[in-house]
Image: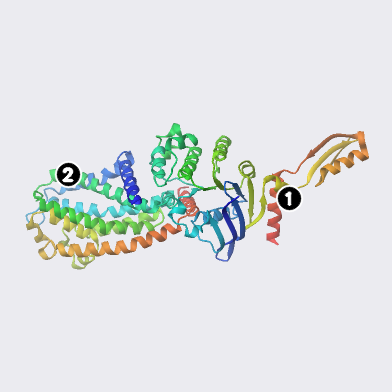
């Protein structure tokens, strides 16, 4: 179908643009480089008497966390595109909305994969004790990543439709940071109180981290996890539930948002943004 | 002439306020019509309804034979839209964006020819956010016509332009060969670009016709000045020719420095809007 082809082209162009200008390049590299610095400091620190160093546990966890952050960039880009009129342009073009969304999925997931590689490749050279030698590891990594993206990108699209300004986007950051804090990314979740563990297990960040650990760590590391297991079925269950919910709600919210876009709504938001600056 | 845009009984209500109250006008195929009115008259609301971006409260609206509120993708492909403030696709390059957006249409303009037409060929590889205000607006027009639309909407296309950019933009619009509805609050612009002027004030159409017709219909008062026996005189009259004939009949050779200033379209327009506003206030 035409819109799919156009969306694909659009996504690739935007992806290329995000790797050929200074501001975007900084945002692609800043976060992974910061995480690599954190890993450097964790590389020799033991986690209790488990026989594992924190760096080894944290690298796959951070990978999972970063994968979930595609949600945030999806949301931010939707809001930005609404503010500057890109979305309205799509609305004024035949099949433009569908192509726009496909393009966004292509560029956000493409950017995400690149960001993960920027972290993973140097990370694997830096950190020892991983078990990433066999094909099974990479297969697990692949399905966890794909399922995680299907679970988180529609949520990002929903958040991006609900929050209308770049400023309200800032409000999303706080709960996201909180979610990361309790999801056992930098320190195993089993060291947290029970009730926090339960909250963390509702959200996708924990399961993406767990899935990545199951892919890249030796089997013995499962002893540190809840229930001494990688819990693949539960991972599929929770991420799958988020995916289904997101895929049902996102089109409804997106359609409603698109219907409300008009020249004067773009102009009104612009005016508001200018007032804030002045 | 076939009808491209047909509006009747159009009403738009926000809460208790009627922004549009029974708006009716027609635009023929290939015609250029200016929707003229003071700020806040409801011009943008009207255009947004015609573009299919806004639902109306009541009334009948037809653009290219379809109701914009139900316009499908095929209808969308026949309509071009240039809005007031677009800052989108800042990271894209001019040629890149025009080529990409052209691909959504069946018979798009050739990118090179289109850029030459709007005078952006020298900036083909520039990032869009680096364009000046006038260049940006010409790009918006290029995007508006990239799919060779049968109807083009231009909302306040020259706001914030310097005189030269305005002149260039007018030349560009005159070269377009399609039905155009443009909104403006600048009478001179409406007069220059449009075959017909529709004046919107207080949510109603208060006049509709060519510039000459409008000037004739609402007879403004011409100003007549003369001297007679070393004394200066001035009078305002709607019948300046008859007045001057009478003047000569009475005083003959004694009349000097005769000057007749006809009511301009601008006076007519201001008188109309003022008249309407006092009526609405009553």
Instruction: Check the image and report above or below for A154 versus B189.
Output: below
Choose mark 2 or mark 1, whichever is in front.
1
Q: Nearer the viewer, residue B70 or B138?
A: B70
Q: Which residue is mark 2?
A: A121
Packing grade of label 1 (10 A; few <14, some 14-19, many >=20) is: few
- Residue B147: image quadrant is top left
Q: Circle 1 sits on which residue?
A: B217
Q: Position of residue A111 (x, y in %)?
A: 27, 47
Q: Say if B201 sits above or below B128 in the image.
A: below
Chain letter for mark 1, please. B
Mark 2 and mark 1, same subunit? no
> What crowding class fits label 2: few (fewer than 14 Cα within 10 Å), some (14-19), or many (20 or more)?
few
User: Can you give x and y, in whole percent of width and height, for residue A246 in the image?
Assistant: 30, 62
- Distance from Cα at disc 2 to Cα at disc 1: 78 Å
* Front residue (pair B210, A103): B210
Count all numbered tags in the image, as a single digit.
2
């Amino acid at each position: 179908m035409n819109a799919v082809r156009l969306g694909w082209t659009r996504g690739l162009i935007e992806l290329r643009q995000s790797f050929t200008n200074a501001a975007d390049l900084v945002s692609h590299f800043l976060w992974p480089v910061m995480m690599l610095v954190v890993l450097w400091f964790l590389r020799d620190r033991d986690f209790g008497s488990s026989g594992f160093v924190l760096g080894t546990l944290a690298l796959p966890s951070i990978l999972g966390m970063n994968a979930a952050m595609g949600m945030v960039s999806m949301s931010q880009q939707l809001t930005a595109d609404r503010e500057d009129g890109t979305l309205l342009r799509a609305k004024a073009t035949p099949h433009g909305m569908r192509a726009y969304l496909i393009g966004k999925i292509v560029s956000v997931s493409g950017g995400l994969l690149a960001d993960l590689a920027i972290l993973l490749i140097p990370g694997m050279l830096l950190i020892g004790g991983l078990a990433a030698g066999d094909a099974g590891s990479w297969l697990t990594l692949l399905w966890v990543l794909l399922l995680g993206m299907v679970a988180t990108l529609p949520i990002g699209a929903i958040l991006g439709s609900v929050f209308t300004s770049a400023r309200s986007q800032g409000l999303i950051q706080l709960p996201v940071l909180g979610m990361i804090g309790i999801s056992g990314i930098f320190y195993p979740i089993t060291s947290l109180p029970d009730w926090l563990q339960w909250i963390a297990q509702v959200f996708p960040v924990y399961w993406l981290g767990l899935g990545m650990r199951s892919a890249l760590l030796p089997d013995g590391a499962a002893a540190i996890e809840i229930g001494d297991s990688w819990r693949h079925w539960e991972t599929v269950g929770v991420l799958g539930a988020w995916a289904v919910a997101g895929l049902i709600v996102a089109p409804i919210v997106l359609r409603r948002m698109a219907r409300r876009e008009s020249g004067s709504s773009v102009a009104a938001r612009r005016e508001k943004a200018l007032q804030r600056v002045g | 002439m076939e009808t491209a845009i047909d509006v009747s009984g159009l009403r738009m209500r926000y809460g208790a306020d009627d922004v549009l109250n029974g708006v009716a006008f027609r635009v023929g195929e290939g015609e250029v019509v200016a929707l003229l009115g003071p700020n806040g008259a409801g011009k943008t609301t009207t255009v947004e309804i015609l573009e299919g971006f806004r639902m109306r409260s009541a009334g009948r609206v037809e653009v290219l034979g379809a109701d914009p509120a139900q316009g499908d993708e095929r209808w969308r492909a026949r309509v071009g839209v240039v809005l007031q403030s677009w800052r989108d696709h800042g990271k894209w390059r001019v040629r890149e964006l025009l080529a990409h957006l052209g691909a959504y249409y069946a018979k798009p303009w050739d990118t090179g020819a289109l850029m030459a037409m709007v005078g952006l060929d020298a900036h083909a590889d520039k990032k869009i956010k680096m364009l000046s205000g006038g260049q940006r607006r010409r790009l918006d027009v290029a995007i508006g016509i990239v799919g060779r639309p049968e109807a083009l909407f231009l909302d306040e296309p020259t706001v914030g332009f310097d005189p030269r950019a305005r002149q260039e933009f007018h030349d560009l619009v005159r070269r377009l060969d399609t039905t155009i509805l443009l909104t403006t609050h600048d009478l001179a612009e409406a007069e220059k670009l449009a075959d017909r002027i529709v004046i919107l004030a207080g949510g109603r159409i208060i006049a509709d016709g060519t510039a000459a017709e409008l000037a004739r219909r609402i007879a403004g008062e011409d100003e007549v000045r003369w001297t007679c026996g070393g004394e200066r005189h001035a009078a305002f009259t709607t019948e300046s020719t008859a007045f001057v004939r009478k003047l000569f009949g009475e005083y003959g050779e004694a009349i000097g420095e005769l000057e007749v200033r006809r009511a301009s379209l601008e006076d007519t327009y201001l008188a109309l809007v003022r008249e309407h506003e006092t009526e609405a206030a009553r």
